[in-house]
Amino acid sequence: MPGSPIVFFILAIVAIGTALGMLISRNAVYSALLLALNFAAVAMLYLTLGAPFIALSQVTVYAGSIMVLFLFVIMLLGAERLQPAEVLRWQPYVAIPLVVILAADFAYNLFRENTEMLKVAVPSADYGTPAAIGNMLFTRFMLPFEVTAVILLVAVVGAVVLAKPDRPARPRSMERSDNPTPSKPVS
Amino acid sequence: MNPLILTTFFPLVGFVVIAFLGAQQKALIRWVALATSLVTFLLSLWMLAQFQVGPAGFQMNTGKLVWAIAGNAEISAAMGIDGLGLLMVLLTTLLTPIAILSTWESVRERVKGFMLFFLLLETGMIGVFAALDLVLFFLFWEFTLVPMYFLIGMWGGERRVYAAIKFFLYTMAGSVFMLLAIIYMGVQSGTFYLPDLIANRAQFAGVQLWLFLGFAIAFAVKVPMWPLHTWLPDAHVEAPTAGSVILAGVLLKMGTYGFLRFNLPLFPQASVQLAPWIAGLAVIGILYGAIVSYAQHDMKRLVAYSSVSHLGFVMLGIFALNLQGISGAILQMVNHGLSTGALFLIVGMLYERKHTREMEAYGGIWKVVPWMGALMLIVTLSSLGLPGLNGFVGEFTILLGAFGSQAIGSQVLVGVATLGVIFAAVYLLFLFERVFLGGMRHAENANLLDLNWREVAMLLPLLILIFWIGIYPKPFFDLIAPTAQNLVTLVQSAPYSALLGH
Amino acid sequence: MLFQGIGAAGGSFSLVPWVVFLPVLGLLLNLLIGKRLGERGVGWIASLAVGAAFAVSALLAFSLMQHPEAVRVPLFDWITVGDFSASWAFRVDTLSVTMMLVVSGVGTLIHIYAAGYMHHDVRHNGEPARYTRFFVYMNLFIAAMMILVSADNYLMLFVGWEGVGLCSYLLIGFWFEKGAGEIANAKAAKKAFIANRIGDFGLLIALFLIFWNFHSLQFDEVFRQAAGAQPWVIRAITLFMLLGVAGKSAQIPLYVWLPDAMAGTTPVSALIHAATMVTAGVYLVTRTHVLYSLDATSQSTVAWVGAATALFAATIAVGQYDIKKVLAYSTISQLGFMVAAVGMGAYVGGMFHLITHAFFKALLFLAAGSVILGMESGQEVAYGHGGHGSSAAHEEFDPQDMRNMGGLRGRMPFTFWVYTIGSLALAGIAPLSGFFSKDEIMVAASQMNPAIFVILLLAVFLTAFYSWRQVSLVFFGSSRTRAAGAASENAPIITVPLIILAVLAVLGGLINFPGVNTLSGWLEHTLGALPEAAFNPLIAGVSLIVALAGIAAAWLSYGRQTATRPNRLDPIENNAAPLFNALAHRWWVDEMYQAVFIRPYQAIANFLAQVVDQGLIDGIVNGAGVVSRAAAQGVRQIQTGFVRSYALMVLLGVVAILTYLIVWRVP
Amino acid sequence: MMQNDILTILPALIVAAWGIVLLVVDLWIPRDRKGITALLAVVGLLVALGVSAVLFPLHTLGFSNMTVLDGFAIYADMIILVSGLLAIGLSYDFIRRIGIDRSEYYVLLLICSSGMILMAHAFDLIVVFLALELLSIPLYVLSGFARPQPASEEASLKYFVLGAFSSAFFLYGVALVYGGTGSTNFAQIIHALTANTLVNPSLFLIGAALLLIGLGFKVSAVPFHMWTPDVYQGAPSSVTAFMSVSVKVAGFAALLRVFVQVFPSLASELTPILWALAALTMIVGNLVALVQTNLKRLLAYSSIAHVGYLLMAFVAYGNAKVVGNATASILFYLVAYGLTSFAAWGVVVAAEQLEGRGLELTDYAGLGRKYPLLGLAMMVAMFSFAGIPPTLGFWGKFYVFQATLQAGSVWLAVIGVVTSIFSAYYYLRVLVVMYMQPGDPTAHPAPWLNLVTGASAAAVVLLAFVPAAVFNLAQQALMWFGV
Amino acid sequence: MVPASYYLALSAALFVIGILGVLLRRNALVMFMSLELMFNAGNLAFVTFARMFGQLEGQIFVFFVMTVAAAEVAIGLALMVEIFRSKHSINMDEINTLKG
């Protein structure tokens, strides 16, 4: 596998550290920032894996725009901190053991026979380049690409529907429907 | 046109006609319903005329009209009838117009719905007795729950909802296991057509105990066998008179019919193996039903428990697995329909007059309603098995068969069952005494009206049959004989009939 | 088919179904047009129907004299299932015709009597419209009884057997709204039916045993194979049949219904509960003598049951005040004699006593009825008209209580004479009929079993004692009430049958007069050669002396009884109160049955209905519902509404599935 | 781009394109005549339905084997399209009545349908994943369409968070399958499996399990069902009706495609899991429904229970002799379930008042008498759900039980029938309230709603007399399915 | 050289941390961020596998995932803004009116 172990371990430690930091930080803003850092670290790892285009997208789309959006909403709502009222007290005591078991499952599955994992194909010269990716995107993966376009469109429409404040809060037909005499069916 | 199919589906004609009538045309709806059921009865008589007495096997058989294919198995719309089925169909078509007539005064609300459900119910019941394909049978079987559920739930007494749901769930709880058994057999043998299945019964001989139980649970609930009977008193008490008549007269017979039609021929070994156990339960039912009847205060409840006792006799006869037992059981199915149907009718008439079924509210009324008293007495005597009336012929034949049954194998058990005739006298005479004899305990009862012509017309056919079967049951036994003989042969010709021998 | 069968039998034998059809015809006529006919017409039709049946019976008897072998007259198939077959078939032989003659003969007389008696009775009870109904029931009874005695197989016999039980029920409960608490009559009727049903249960079992061992219920067929059967089978059959006999013929332990059956009107008591129905058990044993003869144990059981009943009931009769109750216990006792006789193989003796008893007991009952009518009319005279109108006096006054009588000899001389004849016949005083028939039984007992002989002798003494006690209390002394003082003799329609019966009671002994033995010869054709019951002067003398002693004792105790203390007039009561108390309370048998059988049955019924059925069985059913709902509520708690716990549940599923795969399934 | 490529996704393409066009056209439709939008949406769905019917006999792959056209997919398409049509019929008056009649409603519904259709046609995990998102995102929005009603918002948020959570598992599963097989394309995976050239079988297995979980969430199998009652209750009833049918159809289409057609070799490993899922789903769904008092919630649990029955037949998939029949029975059951659901939900929609009122069971007292048609429809629906003949629901149960018994899972079948007794109790309770208790409810039957409800109920009954017609169609649909 | 399994282990670790975040954080936004972390972990696995096989499909997949994630973020954030408007809170534990 490419990349030196030192680089990997540093990045891995950063990634896990920031992820844990996000998890335990009391302040949502810190969480968002730490997550951005995490994304950046992962982007670095992508580079070591021969995926420069993806790495770049990761930085711009994820660490950049998405996390900015998050921060923006946090600031907008002023929701960085919550009252420390814990309703589900037993949740951690169940969740953490379960997650540990899950992690153990994954780990066992990965390291039980890692001979396969060590096999590395020799990548072609243009492996992971934007050109190669673009080429594939617009040929073999044209359909998924178009579908993502529709998904984004739907997301836009949906976001508008959900957040557009222009509708009257009360349904307009309320008075008529609450009338005790049954209203003539509207057709 | 096959008279069987006509008979089965003719009530639907009335259903459609009534569906198009306005809900306010109550009288017209009643007459249409009555006319429909009467025509159905005539059609069934025509069927009887067409029926050849003697040969075993199914007549007016539509054959295997393949209707659907489920995996590897064909579902066919096969219908046909033998003596057993014919008697049951006749019982149904006879009781239905009577039951409809009984609603003339008592059902005033939602007449349209009532009659719609009633006609649906009739088709469902006839279908049960006519179906030769297991899936078709099951369809009709389950379907009968629906109209009955509404008849109890919408036109019933105070606790009608409880009773209706209990009836539905209890019966359904039993029948789902039958569904599994049916499907399993279809899967194994590739057909649901009863004659084919009987021919291939060796295929599932290995698991027939389980299959037997699957069917038996469904039927035992319906019969109802002790201790699965507790839905019955509730259903009977809450149901309107017409519902009780049909419930006791026909629906319960579907259970015993099922045992005869399916359990015995399909699972002979299991039948033989379990016969002593089922007979034991039947005997418990006979005694238990009779004893518990005695402790009731509500007339309908009393009659309901008496059904447990009577159907215990039928079950005992069936699992005698000999000619007498089975023939007697089949005849007793008819008898019980007539006697208990008539009992419920009379109780219903009293209820119409006084709006209570508590025996305490009556007493000594024979003085004011002599005809009703006399008819009630005859029906009571028929129910307690007085020789010369129908009940005796059935009970005697059953007990005789059971007494000599090798399958049951215990004369002591049957002797204990015979005690039932004593207990029957105890509770039935108790009923008659509490209601009709003694002094007038309540002055207002002096104004009770005796039977009117409509009520006489309802009871008369039943009484004629009560006497007819009691004195000259031969035509009935002639109808029954081929079926019974066939069943006995089927049970005993099983490769494992060695079990039967001594 | 119907007439074809009749024709096949040939001769007048083919008329035998008419012994059933005629009463049925009578009842149908009365049922349909009785209202239009009026009382007189109804009575005529009913009596004629029975009389015609008697004529047919007589015709059959004459034919039988020429041709004494049994003839079977099949009518049509009844129940035929597989190898089981029972048809409506009549049997004409000397035994059945004897019974037919008794039934229809006594029946006719009683019908005539009843036509007069009921005229008063329905008015006394305030329900004149019920007159017709009475005769419908009566004819029905005759029909059922005829079926019983003329049946050619056990099943048809059983029809009659239960049919007479039904009529008994109907007639005991005829005044169903009367009696103590306005329900006692209805309850008495029910008691009779149920006690009979217990017996019928035994008979049914016997029938099953017979069929499964002999594959037939037809008499000849059964008897033909009887010798080849296993001993235990015969014993079981005969003992179960004995239960039936005990029910129908009111033997220990099932006799308790008969005293209560006196709630029925007097003609009913005479016809059903004295002369005919209750003797069906004796007839059954006689009819089945082939089987009984094969098993000594059951024979002696029968004999012992009969003897014990004879003595036991006689003791109770001594302590009764009700005129009909005395006769009822007397009937039980006499039935005990008959059963003992047939148990000892003295079938002719049993039948003989059956016949004579039919005469004198019917006479006694009818005469008692005459007394009661006289008392009632006296009561009306004494307390003003419309007995039921002055209800207070009516309710307190019991026209059947012998303490209210006394001195009726003068008021009702005719009744007194026939009553005395009947009582003497009952007591077994020579040369009245009862003497001869009873003597035959005593002879048989002395030959078979000395212990039984002694018991029966005691019973004879008591019989004579209570008979004369009754005569003394009713007819001698002075009137103890105003009603008794005002009582009057009855009309000829009442008294003519009494005369005929009195003649029969006197001359009945001729039927099987010692040395002539007409009845023995007659019945031999059916019963086969039987040991000759020779007349034994010693035995006859002893029993006659014992009977006379009984009469003397009664005369000494009651004859000069002039006491006007109606409440405490019995010398036994005065001198041996506990004993009399026991007798008056019928040895508390009813109370014991109440405590041992009826109350526990009710308690069990209530327990099963409330606790087991509603509580346990239905409780499990409803409990299943409750448990399901509780479980549902429990599971529902998981659905907290918190997204995080939902996610936790998802994770739980994920971990469970993955762990399962990792641990057990990963390749 | 080849003609085949287009053909393979033609129904989805039509619906999606129609939706986008509608979005634009809507701008020119005057405010008070938005009914035209609904009508146009119906036309679009009808066109797609017609096209689907024509495509039914064809079989081809397209887009570099990423999509597939076969009878199975078309069968699913048709259910989804009909479901969309019926949903529009239910929605038309309803959304006007409760004041949420924005034309985006129909657009989202169309695009959501196209996502579902795409799911049925997907032959590559990438497409499956994208289709999953394409159908989910509009549903998140539709669930919250009645904002600012708190229940609707809550439903939307819960659905969204948990949906994304399960998507993450699904995604991770795709990654592991990719790692295990070296491809996400079904054709290549099938090839690898048959040639036994898996890169890493254990990764593949875990990945497949995660796929199962992700799809199990969509069809709401226990224990991944927790969102269902809340979302079904909170979402506008018309939306609930749509998603209770369509999502399950799409989910099962994907499940069948992935597991039956592509991963049959995993049967021995997965069958016990499916067994447990089916049993749990039947038990929990039916049990908790017993104590529900809100009709929407009750129907939600009932829908969970029905998933249990579907999964029960799915358990049979490892048995090569049975799998064809089992799959056909699932397809049949989906039709029965779908039609029945619309009959039931139609009544709920008619009875729902503003602000989510009128949904408690007690609010239905007397409904059967006052509105006979609605009552009748509900009666038919309840009996069909309970599996009482003569309804399609009975045949659905019949076929799935048959498949289960054929596969030898007797105990599972026993659990199935026992739980169906429980189900009968709560279905009957609905009828009790409607017919046997007095009350004066207000419902709003409207022409389109009546048509949809009545037609669904009529179909449930009438098709029950010709079950073979539907079942044969299901079997034909599987002609190219390789079972 | 770093074995592929290390990358996968890292991916798994991030995935479970993401799960923990969803399970333990009440703040809807942080919960949402944790979801993004889970997606991210999946992406890492994809890229690793792609590198392992020397294919590009894995990377393409990641591209699509990112797009979808972006779409989800749009919807999710809009939803949270709307909810905050009506409830003035984005505490997930306060959103539990629907239950049972």
Image: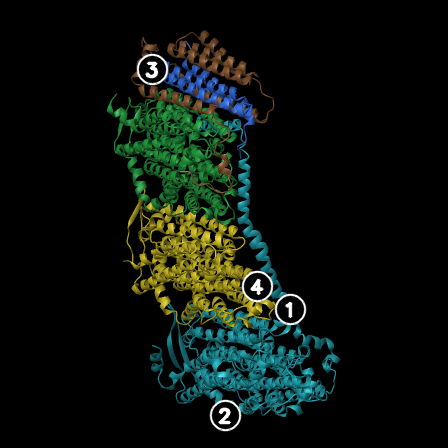
Residue type at the position of mark 2: Val
The chain coloured brown carries which letter? A
Of labels 3 and 1, the one closer to you: 3
The answer to whether residue C440 is visible is: no
Question: How far apart are the two marked residues, 4 and 2, measured between alpha carbons?
Answer: 61 Å
Q: Are marks 2 and 3 in contact (CB under 8 Å)?
A: no
Image quadrant in which the C terminus of chain D is located: top left
| Nearer to us: label 2 or label 1 | 1
Q: Where does label 3 land, which residue?
A: E55
Task: For chain B, give the colour.
Answer: yellow
- Which disc number belongs to residue C592? 1
The shade of chain C is cyan
Q: Mark 2 highlights which residue?
A: C516
Chain identifier, blue in the render: E
Instruction: For mark 1, name the chain.
Output: C
Graded by Cα atoms within 10 Å as few (under 14), some (14 to 19) or many (20 or more), the crowding at tag 4 reads many
SS category of the residue bearing label 4: helix
Q: Amino acid at mark 1?
A: Met
Q: Secondary structure at mark 1?
A: helix
